[in-house]
């Protein structure tokens, strides 16, 4: 199987080599190629990333958005994603190589590189990363997914001696070699679809081959022996980037983005049986919430991580319009009209936390929420208990209740219409957290996007089905 690898390929004589890839400043400053070649390569790269963002690969779209530098350079023969020890990431691409590909070929290469970075994040064990069988298994699995998701029937090609040759590891050719090898051993090979079912399935089956130690094909430039130091892949940066991207994609999936849901579930399925570390990683990212299943491993309150993420999104820093008194006085003295100016961020965000006391309320939930809100910088908290009536309280006070439940009273109080003890709630809350079993007539607040519902054990999570939906998650008790 003699074909060019993604990240391999043949090198044109006019391409430079030997530039220090860790020196982003030099790579950015030097002229990498003819200006028209660079511009056309950049256009193809941007068009490919736009297609990813539209829906073909949400993971790739987010990942390249996190790469602060997209650098055309002839210091590498094809393309690579570089993650260095300073916490930054960069996409490097050879403009001449991108011009040898059509737009669909550029998309294939970028998808392949993005997926490699994700694999590096998911499979961190050094024993796996240095095993040639796993390296080849990753190539097979990634290119199989790329062919499927990008709806291609074959690998991209580049010019070679008057014809065109494929770029990368062809998973079907690898499978054919695997079938032939096992049959010669009088063993039964797996059919193609079962062979590529997960990354580890490919890895396990390749290890059954007798001739795997023979070089079957080339690998990516940033994973090939002797070149790993040329394109740095700092493990800490890769893990941080991978976590951030997958977390955002899962959040998009939970917000009903079908492309994000399909891709992240496919990625999770293809890393099945990866061991306790991977189970723990996916659990931490909230995969069980996306699947609608209960975590089977250690006891972890995923709702707490979810609430922190959702609450943070509702307490984003913002600006406010103010009248600058001194500056305004000077403008008036000079005969000009005073102007409002922007000043920010705001010093305080207002959070209203309401506990349903009509039924059993887990003490651990109350204690944890008190700690969370109390330790959040720049947050002014207001506390309520409610059943049929609304009862403001201060954390530490005894909370009474036990009657019927009326959510509308809380809505009216939060929106300034209900008087309690002769006073109205004068603040405009940035977020309202409702801790309840959910059993009461449904309500529609004026600003549903500000409401966060924590539904206790065996409760009714109707806010998740509300139109428009409100942030809703089940909490665990008994801790």
Image (cartoon, grey):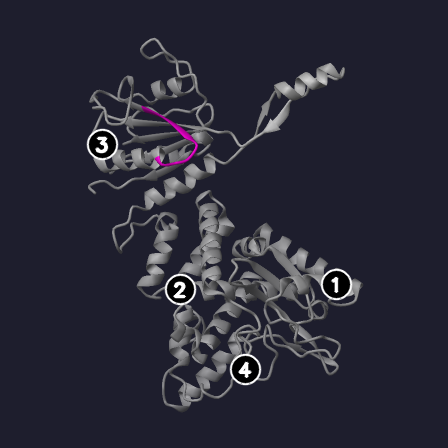
How crowded pointer 1 is (Cα within 10 Å; few <14, some 14-19, many 20+) is rated as: many
Q: Quadrant of the C terminus?
A: top left
* Residue 270 sits above or below residue 263 on the image: below
Of label 1 and label 2, which has the lower sequence position? 1
Of label 2 and label 4, which has the lower sequence position? 4
Of label 3 and label 2, which has the lower sequence position? 2
How crowded pointer 2 is (Cα within 10 Å; few <14, some 14-19, many 20+) is rated as: many
The residue segment tinted magenta is 375-383
Residue 287: in sight, yes or no?
no
**The stretch drawn in magenta includes residue 382:** yes
Q: Quadrant of residue 164?
A: bottom right
Residue at the far top in the pictured view: 422
The residue nearer to you, when weighing 401 against 290, is: 401
Tell me: 383 left or right of 153.
left
**The stretch drawn in magenta includes residue 477:** no
Q: Quadrant of residue 182?
A: bottom left
Give the x, y percent position of residue 287: 38, 52
Q: Secondary structure at mark 2?
A: loop
Residues under labels 1 and 2: Cα distance? 37 Å
Q: Which residue is mark 1?
A: 38
Tell me: 333 left or right of 20.
right
The residue nearer to you, when weighing 356 against 429, is: 429
Q: Quadrant of the N terminus?
A: bottom right
Q: Secondary structure at mark 4?
A: loop
Q: Quadrant of residue 39?
A: bottom right
Residue at x 36% of width, y 86% of height: 187
Q: Which residue is mark 4?
A: 217
Residue at x 34% of width, y 30% of height: 434
Q: Which residue is mark 3?
A: 361
Q: Which residue is mark 2?
A: 271
Residues under labels 3 and 4: Cα distance? 61 Å
* Residue 327 sits above or below residue 191 on the image: above
């Amino acid at each position: 199987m003699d074909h060019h690898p993604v990240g391999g390929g043949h090198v044109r004589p006019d391409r430079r080599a030997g530039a220090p890839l860790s020196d982003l400043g030099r790579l950015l400053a030097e002229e990498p190629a003819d200006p028209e070649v660079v511009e056309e390569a950049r256009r193809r790269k941007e068009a490919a990333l736009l297609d990813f963002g539209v829906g073909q690969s949400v993971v790739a779209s987010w990942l390249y958005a996190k790469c602060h530098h997209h650098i055309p350079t002839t210091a590498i023969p094809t393309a690579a994603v570089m993650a260095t020890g300073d916490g930054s990431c960069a996409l490097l691409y050879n403009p001449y190589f991108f011009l040898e590909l059509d737009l669909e070929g550029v998309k294939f290469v970028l998808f392949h590189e993005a997926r490699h970075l994700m694999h590096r994040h998911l499979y961190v064990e050094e024993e796996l990363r240095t095993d040639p069988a796993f390296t080849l298994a990753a190539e097979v699995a990634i290119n199989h997914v790329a062919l499927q998701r990008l709806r291609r029937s074959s690998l991209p090609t580049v010019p070679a001696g008057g014809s065109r040759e494929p770029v990368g590891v062809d998973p079907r050719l690898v499978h054919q070699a695997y079938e032939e090898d096992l049959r010669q051993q009088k063993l039964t090979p797996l059919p193609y679809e079962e062979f590529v079912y997960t990354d580890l399935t490919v890895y396990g089956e390749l290890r059954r081959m007798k001739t795997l130690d023979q070089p079957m094909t080339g690998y990516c430039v940033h994973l090939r022996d002797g070149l790993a130091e040329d394109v740095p892949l700092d493990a800490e940066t890769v893990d941080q980037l991978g976590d951030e991207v997958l977390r955002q994609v899962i959040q998009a999936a939970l917000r009903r983005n079908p492309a994000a849901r399909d891709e992240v579930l496919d990625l999770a399925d293809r890393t099945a049986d990866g061991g306790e570390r991977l189970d723990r990683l996916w659990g931490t990212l909230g995969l069980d919430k996306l699947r609608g299943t209960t975590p089977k491993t250690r006891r972890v309150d995923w709702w707490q991580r979810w609430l922190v993420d959702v609450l943070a999104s509702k307490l984003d820093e913002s600006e406010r319009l103010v009248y600058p008194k001194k500056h305004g006085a000077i403008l008036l003295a000079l005969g000009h009209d005073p102007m409002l100016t922007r000043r920010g961020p705001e010093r305080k965000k207002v959070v209203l936390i309401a506990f349903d006391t009509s039924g059993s309320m887990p003490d651990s939930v109350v204690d944890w929420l008190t700690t969370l809100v109390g330790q959040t910088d720049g947050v002014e908290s207001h506390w309520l208990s409610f059943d049929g009536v609304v009862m403001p309280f201060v954390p530490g006070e005894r909370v009474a209740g036990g009657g019927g439940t009326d959510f509308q009273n809380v809505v009216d109080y939060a929106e300034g219409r209900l008087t309690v003890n002769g006073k109205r709630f004068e603040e405009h809350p940035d977020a309202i957290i409702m801790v309840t079993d959910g059993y009461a007539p449904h309500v529609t607040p004026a600003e549903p996007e500000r409401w966060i519902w924590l539904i206790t054990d065996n409760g009714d999570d109707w806010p998740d089905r509300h139109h428009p939906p409100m942030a809703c998650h089940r909490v665990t008790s008994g801790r």
